[in-house]
Image (cartoon, rainbow, N blue to C red):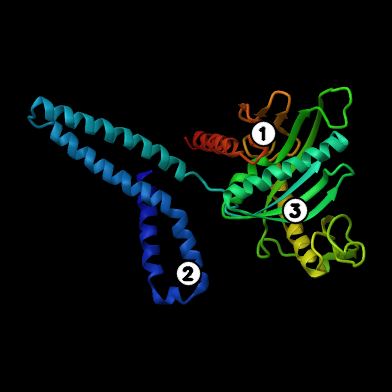
């Protein structure tokens, strides 16, 4: 571990030199790439720097302990050694986490698709609740939400809603939300007061750049049609909505949120790239599906990942067995406890594999 940390520190310091080089400063791409690389290395570099200082101080304190000291000084040195030893263990644990393999998609924006599944109108209403939960969570993170497409139900729920979240680290926190979300509550349309169970599915995909997924003009078919639903005077009067079909895979993406046909086409292509990338990733993972157990954060969409029980104000994440008795806060976007616990669980599993 120390050899790897020293190599990392050497690279960090080399990047500091490169960023001061006038040739690099005049090259926008190199400047951006080097700055990002150094930013990614900084937490581990700072932890390693502190670790070396702590080890140096610990060595000095132990050397002092070996000398002839009066009782008061010996007690002071012992306290210092205990404190330094505790900090050493904390730093070693932190460094092990910082050295874990990083998901290359973690810093990317995400495209989120929520669909009402089992439960009809109630599932669509719950899909709308999940959309509000995620938009409020995004607000707390300083992220921007861009609605891309929505298909409303008669009661004001969402049969389907697609939106993008723009913000650094969006995928690192949102990726654990992929899966089937189950709600248990008394629907507004239920006259007998019976609790119903419904589900909505969530798919979280990292935004795929044009350089990641190349879509050729000859491989797509673009259809335009009149928008439906809310959207202003142009709705149902101009063919601003766009449907893009990727002919080789049959994957389709639609966008009708904006009034501009060009804007809707660009957004539809963003969704299309993300879906194609997601399909390729799933195909790659499927090759190893028989060899590995179910793990945190796989995004298996057939998996029931969380239950929202309204009568008991309880939310349970089934992957890690975490239950919170504050449903109102969770539905208001306070999902950080789940995100943090799932992140720690994934890190622990990666550390177990590395041992």
Q: Earlier in the sequence, mark 2 or mark 1?
A: 2
Decide if residue 150 is on the left or right side of residue 63.
Answer: right
Residue 117 drawn at (x, y percent)? 83, 38
Q: Earlier in the sequence, mark 3 or mark 1?
A: 3
Pointers 2 and 1 in contact (CB under 8 A)?
no
Nearer to the camera, 262 or 63: 262
User: According to the image, label 2 marks what residue?
Assistant: 31
Q: CA distance from mark 2 to mark 1?
A: 45 Å
Residue 135 drawn at (x, y percent)? 68, 48
Position of 228 relative to 188 (above/below)? below
Q: Earlier in the sequence, mark 2 or mark 3?
A: 2
Inspect this view and state whether residue 38 appears.
yes
Q: Which mark is residue 275?
A: 3
Residue 194 drawn at (x, y percent)? 84, 22
**Could you say which quadrant of the image residue 300 lies in?**
top right
Secondary structure under the numbered disc 3 in the rendered image? helix
Report the residue at 41% width, 37% height from top.
93
Secondary structure under the numbered disc 1 in the rendered image? helix
User: According to the image, label 1 marks what residue?
Assistant: 328
Mark 2 crowdedness (10 Å alpha carbons): few <14, some 14-19, many ≥20: some
From the image, state whether disc 3 or disc 1 is nearer to you: 1
Report the residue at 32% width, 44% height from top.
51
């Amino acid at each position: 571990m120390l050899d790897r940390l020293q190599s990392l520190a050497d690279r960090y310091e080399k990047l500091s030199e490169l960023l001061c080089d006038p040739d690099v400063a005049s090259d926008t791409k190199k400047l951006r790439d080097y700055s990002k690389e150094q930013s990614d290395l900084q937490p581990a570099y700072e932890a390693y720097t502190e670790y070396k200082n702590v080890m140096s101080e610990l060595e000095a304190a132990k050397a002092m302990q070996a000398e002839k000291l009066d009782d008061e000084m010996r007690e002071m040195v012992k306290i210092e050694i205990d404190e330094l030893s505790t900090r050493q263990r904390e730093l070693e644990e932190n460094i092990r986490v910082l050295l874990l393999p990083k998901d290359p998609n973690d810093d990317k924006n995400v495209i989120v698709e929520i669909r009402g599944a089992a439960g009809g109108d109630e599932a669509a209403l719950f899909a709308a609740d999940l959309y509000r939960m995620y938009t409020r969570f995004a607000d707390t993170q300083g992220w921007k939400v861009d609605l891309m497409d929505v298909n409303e139900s008669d009661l004001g729920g969402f049969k389907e809603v697609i939106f993008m979240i723009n913000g650094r680290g969006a995928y690192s926190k949102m990726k654990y939300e992929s899966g089937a979300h189950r709600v248990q509550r008394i629907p507004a349309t239920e006259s007998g007061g019976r609790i119903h169970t419904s589900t909505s599915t969530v798919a979280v995909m990292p935004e795929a750049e044009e350089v990641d997924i190349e879509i050729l003009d000859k491989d797509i078919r673009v259809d335009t049609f009149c928008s439906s639903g809310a959207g202003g005077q142009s709705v149902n009067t101009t063919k601003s909505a766009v449907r893009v079909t990727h002919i080789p895979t049959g994957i389709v993406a639609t966008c009708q949120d904006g009034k501009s046909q060009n804007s809707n086409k660009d957004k539809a292509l963003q969704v299309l790239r993300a879906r194609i990338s997601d399909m390729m990733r799933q195909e790659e993972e499927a090759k190893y599906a028989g060899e590995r157990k179910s793990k945190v954060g796989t995004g298996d969409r057939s998996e029931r990942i969380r239950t929202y029980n309204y009568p008991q104000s309880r939310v349970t994440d089934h992957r890690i067995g975490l239950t919170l008795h504050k449903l109102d806060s969770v539905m208001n976007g306070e999902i950080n406890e789940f995100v943090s616990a799932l992140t720690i669980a994934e890190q622990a599993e990666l550390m177990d594999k590395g041992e």
